[in-house]
């Protein structure tokens, strides 16, 4: 599209789409290489530069397109790429591989065996992306778009029906029709609470006042969660279009994307996307000549976890301290600057364009009765395949952990998963047949939350897990309300005593009482859900608390105060590896003779265990 020429109407948009598609057909081959944060950390940019250099050397850069895309999801395999035609999947790439990829696969059409993915179950090499178990078991409605789009190109987005949902509502729907379509879809908020999206939009549209706002919550603060970041940095126009549809439905002319400052690539890509949308006439006044005016600004958060809560986020946008307020009046009536406001997270907004384009019934055909569509999860922990996973709601935890994740990474038995972020719950392996569903997980003592799934094996201490998440939540509590500020602190104090051998029998009852108080009396969602890690571990792993309190023993061998490291003298051959590695000089012994650990000097750091190759170190 010539610079300075805006899309003035629907016909201009349709003709531009045709021209882009015709141009793309001119390429004989396409290389889609991940340029997301994870792959960039593994030197993806160096690989990209080397590929371009190799194409230029052979003078075929005009017939082969390199498209730098957003996150493909399989982050641990990065840098990775897909080559079309053929759907060839290469992973673990290095800059030195670039010349061979161009010479062998692009020019000759031959596959490079050493760059293929190896299935961890069968140990066989897999040629195409579609055959990889990690991808095969998913239902990738949002993430699939990431793999073929350059997030910095509005034309890439337009070519794949981008902004057709916006066109549809402006020419065929009333605002009420849009809200009814969202209602038919059954879309619930993907940010944690699972509130019905249509109900929120309807309340905001019906609220008195002409000045209204829409906000995208991209303040993703859960440890190990990066779903929203990957969608926003990989397909920003999808989120922008979703916000535009929502804004038209409720009657807003101004939107905000509130993104945490720790997401620089997402911020950069959104800035580029917004500028492009304005240049093409898809943001601003009289969009597509159909009388709709709307624009979006970026607000950058300071990394406070509590600012993921709606009222704290709005306070931060207003330049105030990010603290939550009482919920006696909903933000759909009294939100940003006391105006009616609709706030949804990145993934919720990203689902809107496809719902409008394909129909609410299409979206509702996936999932369960109370939880529709697909959901993106960050699968992490002690599992072979980690990364971003998108599945239909209602998919079992077992499918996610064992079919997509392919089981434990170290051969040890999987013990539990923690779902829903730091305020979620821990579920044992005998609960893995539970469907991932807002209501089912809530009833089991956990939640979908923003979408984190942390897999834990038998060497994980569940009391220590509760301690870890309480520590995080105490640090992130704004401290405004007493139940959260003091209650989490006191719960952490008790759990710490238990892990250090000072636990008392009455601590269990006290923990339950405190948890109930914090949950019922806290002001915002952080405090109300903070007891979940404690309550769920008490519910499903009571024997571990009892061992810590009554036997002064940590069954998993994690809590330092309750364990000791010893050397099995019958197994030890005196190689000296542990002696040389010990930073505290706690290990003694002559070469080729059994060593011993001085318990008075040992600091229980575990380094000796990590370096021993003969399984001679025992933890008791």
Image (cartoon, rainbow, N blue to C red):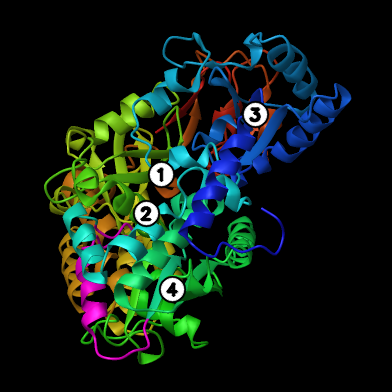
Q: Residues within 10 Å of mark 2 (few under 14, many from 20)?
A: many
Q: Residues under labels 1 and 2: Cα distance?
A: 11 Å
Residue under label 2, please give it.
Answer: 353
Q: Position of residue 73 (x, y in %)?
A: 49, 38
**Is residue 207 within the magenta segment?**
yes
**Residue 24 vs residue 187: left or right?**
right
Left or right side of 375 for 53: right
- Contact flag, marks 1 and 3 (Cβ < 8 Å): no
Q: Please report the residue visible at 51 percent of the width from the left and 42 percent of the height from the top.
A: 146
Q: Earlier in the sequence, mark 4 or mark 3?
A: 3
| Image quadrant in which you'd find residue 523 | bottom left
Q: Nearer the viewer, residue 90 or 530?
A: 90
Q: In the rendered image, which quarter contains the C terminus?
A: top left
Q: CA distance from mark 4 to mark 1?
A: 25 Å
- Label 4 with label 2: CB-CB less than 8 Å: no
Q: Earlier in the sequence, mark 4 or mark 2?
A: 4
Q: Crowdedness of circle 1 by 10 Å Cα count: few (<14), some, many (20+)?
A: some
Mark earlier in primary sequence (3, 2)? 3
Q: Which is more foreground, mark 4 or mark 2?
A: 2
Q: Magenta part mainly helix, strand or loop? A: loop
The x and y percentages for residue 162 are 47, 50
- Pick whichever of labels 1 and 2 is earlier in the sequence: 1
Reading the image, the residue beneath label 1 is 142
As drawn, is 416 to the left or to the right of 45?
left
Disc number for residue 307 = 4
Name the outermost residue toward the right.
57
Q: Name the spot of residue 174 as percent of width and height, x first.
A: 25, 69
Q: Nearer the viewer, mark 4 or mark 1?
A: 1
- x then y, percent, for residue 253: 43, 79
Read off the residue under disc 3: 31
Span highlighted in magenta in the image = 188-212
Structural distance between the alpha carbons of marks 1 and 3: 20 Å
């Amino acid at each position: 599209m010539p610079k300075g020429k805006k899309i003035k109407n629907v016909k201009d948009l349709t003709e531009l789409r045709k021209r882009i598609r015709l141009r793309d057909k001119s390429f004989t081959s396409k290389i889609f290489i991940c340029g997301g944060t994870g792959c960039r950390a593994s030197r993806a940019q160096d690989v990209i530069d080397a590929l371009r250099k190799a194409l230029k050397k052979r003078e075929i850069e005009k017939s082969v397109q390199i498209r730098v895309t957003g996150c493909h999801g399989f982050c641990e395999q990065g840098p990775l790429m897909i080559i079309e035609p053929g759907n060839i999947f290469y992973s673990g790439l290095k800059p030195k591989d670039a010349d061979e990829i161009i010479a062998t696969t692009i020019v000759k059409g031959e596959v490079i065996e050493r760059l293929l993915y190896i299935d961890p179950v069968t140990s066989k090499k897999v040629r195409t992306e579609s055959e990889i178990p990690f991808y095969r078991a998913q239902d990738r409605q949002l993430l699939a778009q990431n793999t073929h789009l350059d997030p910095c190109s509005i034309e890439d987005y337009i070519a794949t029906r981008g902004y057709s949902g916006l066109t549809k509502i402006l020419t065929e729907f009333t605002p009420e029709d849009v809200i009814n379509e969202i209602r038919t879809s059954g879309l619930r908020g993907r940010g944690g609470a699972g509130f019905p999206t249509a109900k929120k939009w309807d309340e905001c549209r019906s609220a008195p006042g002409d000045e209204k706002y829409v906000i995208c919550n991209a303040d993703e603060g859960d440890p190990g969660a990066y779903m929203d970041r990957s969608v926003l940095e990989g397909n920003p126009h999808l989120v922008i279009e979703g916000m535009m549809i929502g804004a038209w439905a409720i009657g807003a002319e101004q939107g905000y994307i509130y993104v945490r400052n720790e997401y620089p690539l997402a911020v950069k890509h959104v800035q580029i996307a917004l500028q492009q949308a304005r240049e093409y006439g898809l943001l601003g006044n009289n969009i597509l000549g159909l009388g709709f005016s709307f624009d979006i600004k970026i607000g950058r958060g300071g990394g406070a976890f509590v600012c993921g809560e709606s009222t704290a986020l709005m306070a931060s946008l207003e330049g105030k301290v990010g603290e939550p307020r009482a919920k006696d009046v909903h933000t759909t009536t009294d939100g940003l600057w006391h105006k009616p406001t609709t706030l949804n997270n990145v993934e919720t907004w990203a689902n809107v364009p496809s719902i409008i384009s394909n129909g609410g019934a299409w979206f509702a055909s996936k999932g369960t009765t109370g939880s529709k569509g697909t959901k993106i999860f960050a699968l992490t922990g002690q599992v072979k395949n980690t990364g971003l996973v998108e599945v239909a709601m209602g998919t079992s935890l077992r499918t996610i952990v064992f079919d997509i994740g392919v089981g434990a990474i170290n051969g040890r038995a999987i013990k539990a998963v923690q779902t829903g972020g730091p305020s979620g719950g821990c579920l044992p392996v005998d609960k893995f047949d539970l469907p991932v569903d807002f209501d089912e997980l809530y009833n089991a003592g956990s939640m979908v939350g923003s979408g984190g799934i942390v897999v834990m094996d038998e060497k994980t201490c569940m009391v220590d897990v509760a301690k870890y998440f309480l520590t995080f939540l105490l640090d992130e509590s704004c401290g405004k309300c007493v139940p959260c500020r003091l209650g989490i602190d006191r719960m952490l104090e008790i759990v710490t005593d238990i892990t250090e051998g000072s636990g008392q029998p009455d601590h269990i009852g006290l923990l339950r009482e405190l948890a109930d108080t914090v949950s019922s009396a806290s002001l915002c969602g952080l405090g109300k859900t903070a007891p979940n890690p404690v309550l769920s571990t008490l519910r499903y792993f009571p024997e571990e608390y009892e061992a810590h309190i009554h036997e002064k023993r940590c069954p998993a061998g994690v809590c330092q105060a309750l364990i000791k490291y010893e050397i099995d003298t019958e197994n030890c051959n005196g190689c000296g590896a542990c002696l040389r590695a010990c930073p505290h000089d706690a290990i003694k012994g002559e070469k080729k003779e059994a060593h011993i650990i001085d318990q008075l000097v040992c600091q229980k750091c575990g380094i000796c265990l990590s370096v021993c190759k003969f399984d001679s170190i025992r933890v008791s």
